[in-house]
Image (spheres, helix red, strand yellow):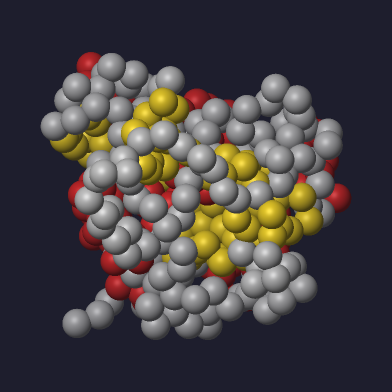
């Protein structure tokens, strides 16, 4: 593709009539869906954006649907001011500590992260907002997945964010997860200082492994603020995280599991095993819900999970007279 004077990248292809799947390759490393096209087509087991090319004698194609997700790019030198409802994507540097973390995670080349963030209407960074952080399986882009969860987060009044590696080691699918999201928080919190105490939920099959990383003993946040959304997961990674490095109170985190009844990758039986494993470990709030489809993100469950997380809001354990960040945000008429 070539970049025009208006900043838009374009290319022209000659295609025969038919149905096609496509994606954009950004910076030579990140495969992303077309943010202005919600249609999807699976090719060789990989989900892509979809386009229909009509024949010469076919009726004019209908106008494309109104974009449900817009990605705006900016440089790291600008003020962080995302447009409510739109995804803001930018590249941020890793600190020396994050680079050291990346080396431990197997990527010595990583020095930048691509982060994306979207905020709801009436967003004010001086207030407290719940944040949904996407952490997918290693073979998939967190930002791609974020686009599928973004609208539900906006509807429920949540901030949603994700990050991917820019420089990934050869053959390392997905790249290391924690150093990139850590770099995103490093970039955001100096501009939005209140964010260090915002309540966090993590979403994705590997999300449970990230929860201990969000433990901030110097802040007012406690592990009871954490929530975990697991969609199409055939492994209990939360128990792995608990045995590895869980902070006190980790077992009080609420876990919502979404299971497709015809899912052959993460079967209903495996989802039931994950639920039972979580409860056997000692997780006190575990909810498993099913839907009539296969291995996919079921949109109604996203909003349902976020509303359930809201309902699980605890009172702050530090003082009976002081409410938690969840209470501050969700105590509304």
Left-right relation of 128 to 245: left
Residue 230 visible within the image: no
Q: In this view, does 99 lie above or below 232?
A: below
Residue 185 position in % (x across, y down): 64, 60
Which residue is nearer to you in this view: 117 or 62? Answer: 62
Q: Position of residue 228 (x, y in %)?
A: 39, 44
The residue drawn where x is 26% and y is 54% is: 60
Residue under the point 68% across and 26% down: 172
- Whether 237 is drawn above or below 310: the answer is above
Front-most of residues 9 and 212: 9
Locate residue 6, reporting x and y percent.
Answer: 65, 72
Towards the viewer: 133 or 284: 133
* Residue 112 in view, yes or no: yes
Q: Quadrant of residue 194?
A: bottom right
Callout count: 0
Residue at figure coordinates x 77%, y 73% from the top left: 77
Q: What residue is shown at x 68% (from left), y 79% (from top)?
A: 79
Residue closer to the observer: 148 or 205: 148
Horizontal arrangement in the rendering, residue 255 relative to residue 9 (left or right): left
Determine whether 169 is above or below 330 in the image: above
């Amino acid at each position: 593709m070539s970049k025009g004077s208006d900043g838009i990248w374009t290319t022209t292809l000659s295609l025969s009539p038919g149905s096609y799947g496509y994606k954009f390759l950004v910076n030579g490393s990140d495969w992303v869906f077309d943010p202005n096209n919600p249609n999807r087509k699976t090719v060789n087991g990989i989900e892509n954006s979809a386009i229909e090319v009509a024949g010469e004698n076919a009726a004019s194609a209908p106008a494309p649907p109104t974009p449900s997700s817009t990605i705006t790019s900016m440089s790291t030198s600008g003020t962080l001011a995302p447009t409510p409802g739109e995804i803001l994507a930018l590249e941020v540097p890793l600190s020396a500590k994050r680079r050291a973390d990346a080396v431990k995670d197997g990527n010595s080349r990583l020095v930048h992260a691509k982060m994306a963030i979207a905020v709801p209407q009436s967003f004010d960074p001086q207030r407290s907002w719940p944040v949904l952080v996407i952490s997918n399986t290693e073979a998939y882009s967190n930002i791609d997945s974020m686009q599928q969860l973004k609208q539900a987060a906006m509807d429920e009044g949540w901030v949603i964010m994700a990050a991917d590696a820019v420089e990934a080691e050869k053959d390392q699918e997905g790249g290391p997860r924690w150093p990139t999201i850590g770099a995103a928080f490093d970039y955001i919190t100096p501009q939005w200082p209140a964010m260090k105490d915002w309540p966090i939920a993590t979403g994705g099959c590997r999300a449970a492994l990230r929860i201990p990383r969000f433990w901030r003993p110097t802040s007012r946040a406690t592990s009871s603020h954490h929530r975990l959304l697991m969609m199409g997961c055939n492994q209990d990674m939360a128990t792995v995280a608990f045995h590895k490095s869980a902070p006190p109170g980790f077992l009080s985190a609420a876990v919502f599991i979404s299971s497709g009844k015809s899912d052959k990758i993460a079967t209903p039986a495996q989802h039931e095993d994950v639920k039972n494993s979580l409860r056997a470990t000692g997780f006190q709030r575990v909810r498993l819900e099913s839907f009539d489809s296969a291995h996919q993100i079921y949109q109604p469950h996203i909003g349902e999970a976020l509303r359930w997380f809201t309902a699980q809001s605890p009172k702050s354990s530090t003082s009976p007279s002081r409410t938690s960040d969840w209470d501050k945000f969700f105590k509304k008429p």
